[in-house]
Amino acid sequence: MLHAPVIGDSHQQLDMPSLLEMLARSSSRPRYAFMVLNLIAQVSRSDGSAGPLVAKGGGLIPLRDWLCDALTPMGQRDPRRVALEERIRSDLAMSGALPMDEGQATAMVEDAIREQVRASGKTNVSRAVSELVRAGLLKRHYQGYCVDHHNRGAQRQAVYILAGCARGLIGGRQEQPRAVPRQAELVF
C-alpha cells in the first residue's frame, strides 16, 4: 500500500489512519504519543500553539504539568503506582510525618504521589513530544524569563505548536476568550 506523505504538507486534511500509521512508525509508544498529541490539540489556540501556561481551576499551571496531570489517571491501576503509594505511606509513617487524622494522612500521601508521578511524567511527556517533533507533527520552543539563552531550564516554559496534518486536530473548535493577563500586559 502506498500512502501520500504526511510530513511537510500543512494544508493536508487530517487523515486519522495515516496519522496513526505515522505514529506507529515513528514512536516507541504510539498510543501514549497520540494521547499527548490529542491533549495538546485540546488546549491549543487557533494558531495551533499551546502553552506556556494552561488555565486550570481558576489558576494557571505550566503546560507540561497540565499534561502530566491529565495523563495520571491512565496509571491508577498500575501495580507500580500501588507499590509507590504503599512505599510513600510507610516512609512517612516511619519518619513520623504522617498525621494521625486519616483524611489529612490520605491528602499528604496523595500530594507526595502527585509530585513523584508528575516528576516522572514530565520525562515521559518530553520523550513523547520529542518523537512527535521528529515525526513532523509538533514544533517546540521555550518562552519565559530570558528568551533564547543557552540555559533552557532557567524559568522557561515549553510551548508546543501543532504542525503538518496534526493541525487538523483543532479544526472547527471555537477558541475560548482569554481572561488572564499575559506577561508585560497591564491590567487596569
Image: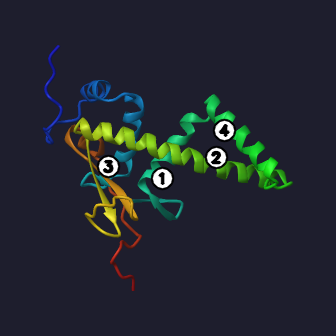
Disc 1/disc 2 C-alpha distance (Å): 14 Å
Disc 1/disc 3 C-alpha distance (Å): 23 Å
Residue 53 in sight in this render:
yes
Q: Quadrant of residue 18?
A: top left
x and y percent of residue 109 in the render? 71, 49
Q: Secondary structure at mark 4?
A: helix
Disc 3/disc 2 C-alpha distance (Å): 34 Å
Pointer 1 and pointer 4: residues touching (CB < 8 Å)? Answer: no
Residue pointed to by mark 1? 65
**Quick one: label 4 or label 3, which is nearer the N terminus?**
4
Q: In the figure, is residue 147 to the left or right of 154?
A: left
Mark 3 Cα shell of 10 Å, populated few (<14), some (14-19), many (≥20): few
Amino acid type, mark 4: Leu
Residue that appears at 52% across and 48% down: 119
Residue that appears at 50% across and 41% down: 71
Residue pointed to by mark 4? 84
x and y percent of residue 41 in the render? 34, 46
Amino acid type, mark 1: Asp
Is residue 96 positioned above or below 156 on the image? above
Residue pointed to by mark 2? 113
Residue that appears at 30% across and 29% down: 23
Disc 4/disc 3 C-alpha distance (Å): 39 Å
**Mark toward the viewer: 1 or 3:** 1
Disc 2/disc 4 C-alpha distance (Å): 7 Å
Pointer 2 and pointer 4: residues touching (CB < 8 Å)? Answer: yes
Q: In the figure, is residue 132 to the left or right of 116?
A: left
Q: Nearer the viewer, residue 62 or 28?
A: 28
Pointer 4 and pointer 3: residues touching (CB < 8 Å)? Answer: no
Q: Quadrant of residue 128?
A: top left
Disc 1/disc 4 C-alpha distance (Å): 20 Å
**Quick one: label 1 or label 3, which is nearer the N terminus?**
1
**Which disc number belongs to residue 173?**
3
